[in-house]
Amino acid sequence: MTSIRPAPRRRALPFLLVAALLTLSVWTLLRVLLWGIAGPADIGSAALHVFARGLWFDLSVLAWLMAPLLVLSALLPARLRASRFMARLRWGALWLMVALLLFGAVSEVVFWEEFSTRFNFIAVDYLIYTQEVIGNIMQSYPVGLIVGGIALVAAFIVFGVSRVVGFVSAARRPVVRLAMLVGALVLPAASWHFAALEQMEGSGNAYADELAGNGLYAFAAAMRRNELDYERWYATLPQEEADEVLLDLHVERLPLSSPDRPSAMDDPPHDKVPFSRRPRNVVLVTIESMSAEFVGAYGSTEGLTPELDRLAADGLRFKEVYATGTRTVRGLEALSLGTPPVPGQAIVRRTHNNNLSTLGELLEPQGVVPMFIYGGYGYFDNMNSYFRGNDYLIVDRTDFPKDSIVFENVWGVADEVLYANALKALNDKAAAGKPFFAQIMTTSNHRPYTYPDGRIDIASPGGRRGGVKYTDWAIGEFIREAKKQPWFVDTLFVFVADHCASVAGRTRLPVAKYRIPLIFYAPDMLQAGEYAERVSQIDLAPTLIEVMGKNGDDHFFGRSFFEADAPLDRAFISNYQDLGYLRGDLLTVLSPRRVVRAYKVDPVTFESTPTEVDPQRAREAIAYYQTAASAFKQGRLHAIEAK
């Protein structure tokens, strides 16, 4: 009689191995998806760099993730591992692990679409402001459907691998337990020692370098590097030499190597300004994410900014202006403090940032009322603390009467509401006979791009195009209402962006993605025209001091647009760790580990091509950035002694 033998059972794979393979598979598929979103044409032939280094970073992160699982597996007694409860718990843990992997992948896709990078210090910051960030996500995406889909897909994946997963229930020999514990220590130690964020780089393409990374690794690195000590990480010069370089560049600040401290009132205005009379008041409108490429006056043909185009035609349009960074706090730092960006976190977000030589700190003792007016909650990004600590009067969303708020979303009130309340605040100061300097920060040109219906011909939510057009419409309404006020004829209106809408590009510092609009509008005292020289955001603060006829423009690293000295034709652009110095057609970039690179910038397309470092341009870049960082660290950005 022929016996029938059961088919041999397929050998089960250990749980930890299956978990590791699933993790690597999800991260690899995520990398492929992000490649498709970025566009293969923009990445070029960098597949080996992307996937080889990508696997290296994935393994580096996996070493950390596997460590607690190895410890747990080594220490659990055999009786507990063999229990029915533990079997169920393992399946639940496997499902949760897959769901979290998928959730992280979806989060990275969303983050990539917004910033074109893996998780970085922006993601770290967003953990602090959960109300705004979660609210923004809830208003921008179908979160319920996404989470439900993730849970369902995770269940299908777990079911699919269930036939090959094996759970060890037999007692482990002591030597096996010891090996697992040693592995739990050695794997993360090796990752810490051998892997570094800079290993992402080397392809010559910023997209490919970002894709080569791992989101969790980049996130952890950003948490460690939120503040980078310049002298430890970047190329340096002796401070006396740096001071000499800045003096040759007509930077009027007291040299950092000098033991003296500046006073608040030591330099009367001396530059010629193109005004028939000096403005009594200044209203500085900082427009959220308004790239120059959106504005008709700067070449756009989409017709999204008819109001700004009219103001540019009737005012003084600055042709080539560059933001210093990629976030609102960086723009606020540059516009108020006039300093090159320090590496890591913006000064607005740091401690010991009060009583600095800001516009508010300099103007308030001279009888001008400085104001910061914001459409959102000013605690976000530490804005209220920073401006209040520098003598600004704060007016934010919490100060607006409820019946004035016709529309709001998680980021703030609609711009029209902001302007209406700003006008009330300005009228109150004017009625009291006080000259004012008011910096208004808008919010509407930001995801989820929602705004009141009936204002423009793009229905809300209108995406970026709708956000830009509504923002422009609200500016037109603001100016029409301001013209009705008696103080209008004595007021200079300044319109400038905090940063661009996107910084995606083939290089880490794509020059075109930092170009922003800047318009001076004062029809009763300023002739229409164009200012063609290249300038930086940091030059606006000393310019406004000079324009108003006040003292103190020599407390800034920036220079007044209207100085008699020859224009510098230079700008500062940065992300949180790469510091760029653009002068002429050469972009010099300072990076951690004292790396200095240079790029030739096409004057028409703004495309950057690697080139040799110019020693003099490198010295200038180092002098600016080193001195700015050291001045803040040493407390030498103060205009006066702290009160």
Image: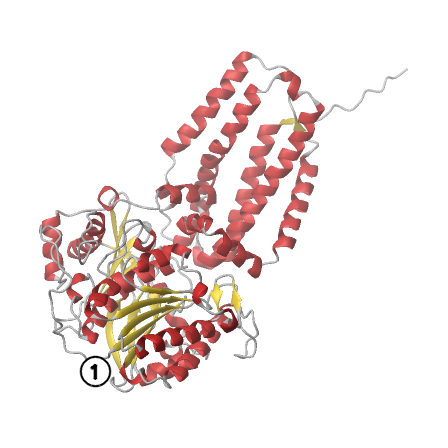
Q: How is colour applied across the structure in the image?
A: secondary structure
Report crowding for label 1: few under 14, some 14 to 19, many 20 or more residues within 10 A (C-alpha): some
Compared to residue 622, the image places residue 437 above or below, namely: below
Using the image as rendered, state which of residue 425 and residue 221 is in the foreground: 425
Q: Is residue 69 above or below residue 285?
A: above
Whether residue 169 appears in this view of the structure is no
Q: From the top left corner, tell me how far across and down residue 478 is, in percent.
A: 41, 79
Q: Residue at x 47, y 58 (%)?
A: 114
Whether residue 422 can be seen here = yes
In the displayed structure, does residue 262 sit left or right of residue 424? left
Three-letter amino acid code at the position of disc 1 = Phe
Looking at the image, the residue that sits furthest to the front is: 432
> In the depicted view, which residue is nearer to us: 482 or 316?
482
Left/right placement of residue 363 relative to residue 565 reads: right
| x and y, in percent, of residue 275 in the image | 21, 82
Position of the C terminus by quadrant: bottom left
- Residue 308 in percent (x, y) is at 39, 79
Quarter of the figure with the N terminus: top right
Residue, disc 1 = 275
**Residue sitting farthest toward the right:** 1
Q: Is residue 483 above or below residue 419?
A: below
